[in-house]
Image: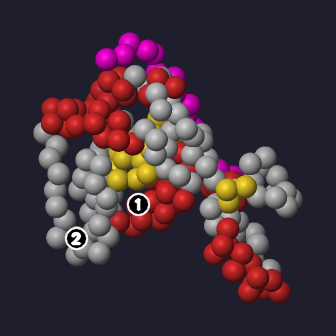
Amino acid sequence: MSSRAVRRTTGRTTDDDLAQVLRKVGLDQNNDDDDEENSTTSNRRQNVFQCFIDNDENDENPKRLQVSDKSEFSQMILAVSRDYRSSKMSQIAEYFGIPYEVQRGSVGLKIGLIANQICDIYIHLSPRTKHWDSAAPEIIIKEAGGELTDLFGEQIIYNTEDVHNYNGLLATNGVSHETAVDALRPLLNEFGRFRVINK
């Protein structure tokens, strides 16, 4: 257990925030020139996981998104929900000893924070997200070197009739993923959370 004070950064997600994330993953919606439609589409398919590290829209040398290499929770930043925080989530953050948090909305945006080294880990306890909340973010974070599974460390299976992510979500920078799964296990048992198999 850790007695570290948690430092949070808060703020509403603005259109500028969204535009920045879209630009960083190569999906800037301002690049819709009809004369370049074919080349732009091809370029997006090949470079969708590249970003402009210096946030310069005119930069001709985009670099690939890359997660952090932090392995110690005490050095990490946790991505958390902007609008709701359960006592269980507070318990997890304290147990892990993660000293910093960034509050933002949407699963995809929080995954983008990890892919861009703004955050290092995201733990989503709720069973209410669905496959369309996690499918695209999973591709992005894995291409950036990270990992996304359910809370139990199992891969999410998308070709099921039931599209709920009943087992929550765990996204990390990859290097810390197995450690996070192991650390979560006793807490999930304490919370009475057991893995559900979708059909």
Q: Is residue 60 visible?
A: yes
Where does residue 14 sit, x and y in percent of width and height?
63, 50
Instruction: Give the numbered dot on residue 162.
Output: 2
Q: Say which element carries label 1.
A: helix
- The relative height of residue 38 versus residue 193 in the rendered view (above or below) is below
Q: Is residue 15 visible?
A: no
Residue at left offset 16%, top offset 43%: 193
Q: Bin the neighbour count of mark 1 within 10 Å (Cα to Cα): few under 14, some 14-19, many 20 and up.
A: some
Return the residue at label 1. Answer: 134
Where does residue 181 sit, x and y in percent of width and height?
30, 40
Q: Amino acid at mark 2?
A: Asp
38 and 31: which is toward the camera = 38
Quadrant of residue 38 within the rendered picture: bottom right
148 and 107: which is toward the camera = 148
- The relative height of residue 37 versus residue 63 in the rendered view (above or below) is below
Rendered-image quadrant of the C terminus: bottom left
Write down the region rendered in magenta.
1-17
What is the C-alpha distance between the residues marked 2 and 1? 14 Å
- The relative height of residue 180 versus residue 139 in the rendered view (above or below) is above
Residue at left offset 31%, top offset 59%: 155
Does residue 164 show up magenta in the picture? no
Decide whether the magenta segment is chiefly helix, strand or loop.
Answer: loop
Q: Amino acid at mark 1?
A: Ser
